[in-house]
Amino acid sequence: MSVNIAVVGATGAVGEEFLRILESRKFPINELRLLASRRSAGKKIQFCGKEHIVQELTKNSFKDIKIALFSAGASISREYVPYAIESGAVCVDNSSAFRMDDDVPLVVPEVNTHDIPKHHGVIANPNCSTIQLVVALKPIHDAAKIKRVVVSTYQAVSGAGLKAIDELEKEAKSILEGKEGFQRKLFPHQIAFNVLPQIPQSNAFLPNGYTSEEMKMVNETKKIMGDNSIRVTATTVRVPVVRSHSESVNIETEKKITAAEVKRLLSTAPGIQIIDDPAKQLYPLATDAAGKDEVFVGRIREDVSLDNGIDMWIVSDNIRKGAALNAIQIAEKLL
Ligand code: 25A
Ligand code: L14
């Protein structure tokens, strides 16, 4: 059965990826409606060999739409998701607007597909750094019960959208050409050849000293895993990488688990590929993960400072599994 699909934020970094993935996975689409701000209305986009014209998002945009994929930021979702639901659509929302609402499932298909049927018109797609983390944590939690997770991220600029990729490229070019006076519009400091311990780029810091991105990882991990007893702390960092987030992860478990057992568990877990061959200097890299679907895990070892501790390195494409692919996997389960 083919369905009518709307993509809200179709011209953004995530929106463009939605279209690539819908096409390559042959999602059964009857009508595809591309929605964005007035700035992009009229823009022509090719999909499955046919020209589609981007329309301005309005409250009347959702007539006859079955599934609406949202990725235009939290304020747009808060305003327009209710209209989509009213028109009878089910929304898969990439923004942070509804993720922690009690009656909204927050879903990573490898972990909690069982939460999907509980929806009331909207299913939230988690934060990108959280998605790749929980895909790797779940098999370990099932086997050895995770007590605590310490994670530091190395996040690509594409998480902040197309404008952020543009700023990194232009800033790097201007530095290499020895030009002065580059005007930043997005990042609070130089991002080219630098590392910024702040995500997002504005209004990041909360009264407890964490950033909102860090607290998303703390809270969303517990909700997706369905276990509030897991203690999580995070430091989220922007690095001058275009695509794919990397994470250094330390896990403390209740039961002892060896590095060999973790490798065996993760090697058969859904959505994961292990790249872990120190002798050949092989481990997951952002540049290799870009454009791929899997969560890549490597550098798996036992923590020398803990009785029951595991260290590992997790990399995945933030725009694919971290956003568009995960949302489309949810939509596939809805069908
Ligand atoms: O609030 P959140 O949840 O934290 O999310 C904040 C942002 O994070 C991205 C996404 O940016 C979002 O805006 N994001 C969300 N979830 C993500 C995830 N899981 C995620 N990133 C990674 N992983 P984005 O760049 O991917 O997408 C932005 C899209 O939203 C559309 N949009 C914006 N305002 C809208 C709207 N659509 C409808 N109505 C509105 N009022 C936006 O479309 C884009 O598709 P657009 O038309 O505004 O932009 C089209 C082109 O115009 C450029 N542009 C953007 N802003 C301006 C601009 N040009 C001039 N002036 C501007 N002020 C864009 O570069 C784009 O090429
Ligand atoms: O909550 O800027 O989904 O790298 C995704 C992109 C948060 C910010 C989310 C980034 C956003 C993140």
Image (cartoon, rainbow, N blue to C red):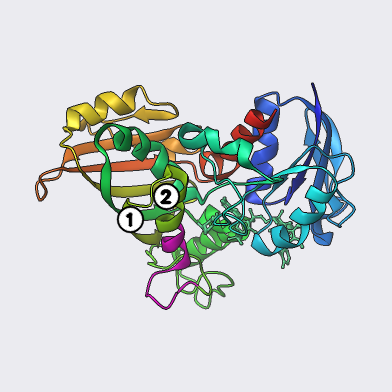
| Residue bearing mark 1 | 232
The span shown in magenta is 204-216
Image position of 39 (left or right of 301): right
Q: Considering only order in the chain, which callout, 1 or 2, is on the residue closer to the N terminus?
A: 2
Name the image quarter holding residue 68.
top right
What quarter of the picture does the C terminus occupy?
Answer: top right
| Residue bearing mark 2 | 221
Q: Is residue 38 visible?
A: yes
- Where does the image place residue 26, in percent across and percent down from the top left? 70, 23
In front: 243, or 58?
A: 58
- Quick check: marks 2 and 1 in contact, CB under 8 Å? yes
- Where does the image place residue 271, in percent across and percent down from the top left? 45, 29
Which residue is found at the position 45% from the left and 74% from the top? 205
Q: Is residue 286 visible?
A: no
Q: Is mark 2 within 8 Å of ligand 2?
A: no
Name the image quarter holding residue 283.
top left
Image position of 176 (left or right of 29): left
Q: Find out whether residue 100 is within the magenta segment.
A: no
